Image (cartoon, rainbow, N blue to C red):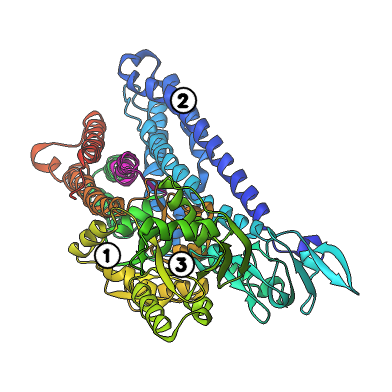
Amino acid sequence: MAPASERPPTPVSVIDQQRLTLKKELRQLLISLVLLVPLMVIAMSTMHLTRHLLWVALIQLVLTTAILVVNFHFFSRGFKALFKGVPNMDTLVAIGASAAYFYGIIVIVLLIFTDPTIHALYFEGSATIVTLVSLGKYFEHRAKIKTSNEINKLVQLAPKTCTVMIDGQQRTIAVSDLQVGDIIMIRPGDIVPVDAEIITGHGLLNQAVITGESLPVTKTVGDMVISATTNQDGTFTCRATKVGADTTLAQIVTLVEKASNSQAPIAKIADRVSGVFVPIVIVIALVTFIIWWSVGRDFATAFNFAISVLVISCPCALGLATPLAIMVATGKAAEHGILIKDAENLETLAHINTIVLDKTGTITTGELTVTAVRPLQNNLSSINLLQFCASIERYSQHPLAKAIVNHFTQQQGSYLEARNFTEIPGRGAKAQIGGRNLYVGNAKFVAPYLHNADKTRADALTQEYAAQGQTPIICATEDKLLGIIALADTLRPDSITAIKHLRALGLDVIMLTGDNTATAAAFARSVGISKIIANVLPAEKYQHVENLKAKGRRVLMVGDGINDSPALKAAHVGVAIGSGTDIAMDAAGMVLIKNSLNDLVTALQLGHRTITNIKLSLFWAFFYNALCIPLAAGVLYPWLHLALNPMFASLAMSLSSLCVVANALTLRGFKPRL
């Protein structure tokens, strides 16, 4: 066994580390805010404290220094990126804050040695920049902490212990000690610990967490069972075929980790523009200094103009543009029942061109209901047929049986006495009612008791309902076909209209499901989807999403189950249905709380509107710089003796930020077009 120091961190330890980091960021943010408030008050009062300018300046220096030290990571990352030739938002923050800070120090020196009336400092600008950007970073990191939570939840699905057969005796051992070939005992209610092959007995396995199938599957000798699936009925022993990292559940965990750690394909808008803006500002400041010094001005004047260029370029408005719009947009999304976890998802929504939809629990409700009761004898009514079937099925625990019983209960009918009930797993059940043997089940189950004509008719009707995405249950006596009851996983009320709107937006809509092809095709036709991918396992869902991405498609995946989580993380935007599993919701970047696909349309429209809003805010931020930087550089000074007064510079920066705030608030008026 490897020493503790060499073992890879567990999901829990990763989560704990992320939480500690987030607490540290919150502490730094609170310190910055507490120090910034008195700094702003003092800065705004400077003009009224002319007798104590030096002391006021020194107090501002101390407060600002403390804030910059707390947020030193911006400077280390920003200048590191600059030296590597890839300046980003942190670089812009570092340069702007540094310029304002050192300008203030120079002013203090002038206050001491030359001009005691100077009072323009810019310390508050330096502190405000790093504090505002820290606020945005904190909320961004808080949303991303859930990445490891979902992995931990996946790990917790597997049982910690299991019962194995050793020399004919049952023993309880840790699942981690299982080896390939071990014989495992599975009883009703047990969770299958590893992938295995049944060697004796049978079971009714709920595989929804892995395959997404809405119906439990009967497994008998020779069939494979999958880790993390639940045995609802029956008892069996199975031989372990895959253990540890080779199990299906472990592979899902690996896929989620892989998708979570992959690099986001879209860079932040602010970083992209910063990569161009930062070098330009630096060059302008250097050129300004060189020109003013070369034309005979003193060093102080040339340096003052150069520093003014850097100060006026402080990215207050640029830093506010994205977080403010995101804050308003996420609040508006929440009003419509849409949980958006971070800014990247909103940015990416504007570029989505492919929608991938899971079927069960996403397009459908995931709940079985009776869709048709069809008597095939003239003297038999629908309620009589339903009564016969329900009187037998009430003794079964199969989901199909429960759906028939629930439907009959709603009709407020009375049950008939059924004797000698017998259930054949995966096929059907039989009992005696009124002295006659009745059989309820699939076509293969009742076939031995029917005449050839009825057999042919039963097969034809079975195919007819299956083609419609429905599951037929046949009821018969020993020599007569009584009728058919059809059941189906029902569509969500708004699935058809939502998919219609998605296609109207020019999006390519694909159904990706673990269900069989016939059922998937029937549902796809009913909601207007022409492209389907059926019979897929979790790893295949993930791979299909990756294949679409490899073809240059911008993919949005919608799902509700654990089996969807790798694909949700792999997609450019993963969207979970609110009624789905916690793991699916954690894996997704967005959650539709009201379980409505119409809200997906709303989210896409809001994404487009938000990105447009951010781009407009960035325009205002750079338009302000385009006007003020030449003035700060002294372009008009030789002719009009017009330079940028520090007070007007502060006002201009405030107005720029106010424009960005006002523009972001226009998102509050967003209304979906449905």
Tell which tag, 3 or 1, sits nearer the viewer.
Answer: 1
Say which amino acid is labelled 1: Val
Classify 10 Å Cα crowding around label 3: few (below 14), some (14-19), many (20 and above): many
* Position in image of residue 420 (x %, y %): 64, 63
Say which amino acid is labelled 3: Ala
Residue interval drawn in magenta? 315-341
Q: Are marks 3 and 2 in contact (CB under 8 Å)?
A: no
Name the residue carrying label 2. 58
Would residue 380 appear left or right of 672 to someone viewing this image?
Answer: right
* Position in image of residue 81 (x %, y %): 44, 59
> Residue at (45%, 83%) from the top-left corner?
451
Name the residue carrying label 3. 567
Is 325 inside the magenta-drawn segment? yes
Find numbered disc 3 in the image and state the secondary structure of the residue it sits on.
helix
Find numbered disc 1 in the image and state the secondary structure of the residue it sits on.
helix
Q: Is residue 239 visible?
A: yes
| Separation (CA) of disc 3 from disc 2 | 56 Å
Is 371 inside the magenta-drawn segment? no
Q: Quadrant of residue 197?
A: bottom right
* Position in image of residue 207 (x %, y %): 56, 66
The label number, if any, that marks residue 57 in the structure image = none
Give the answer, above or below, for where 110 lies relative to 243. above
Task: Return the disc, 3 or 1, that comes first in the chain's sequence.
Answer: 1
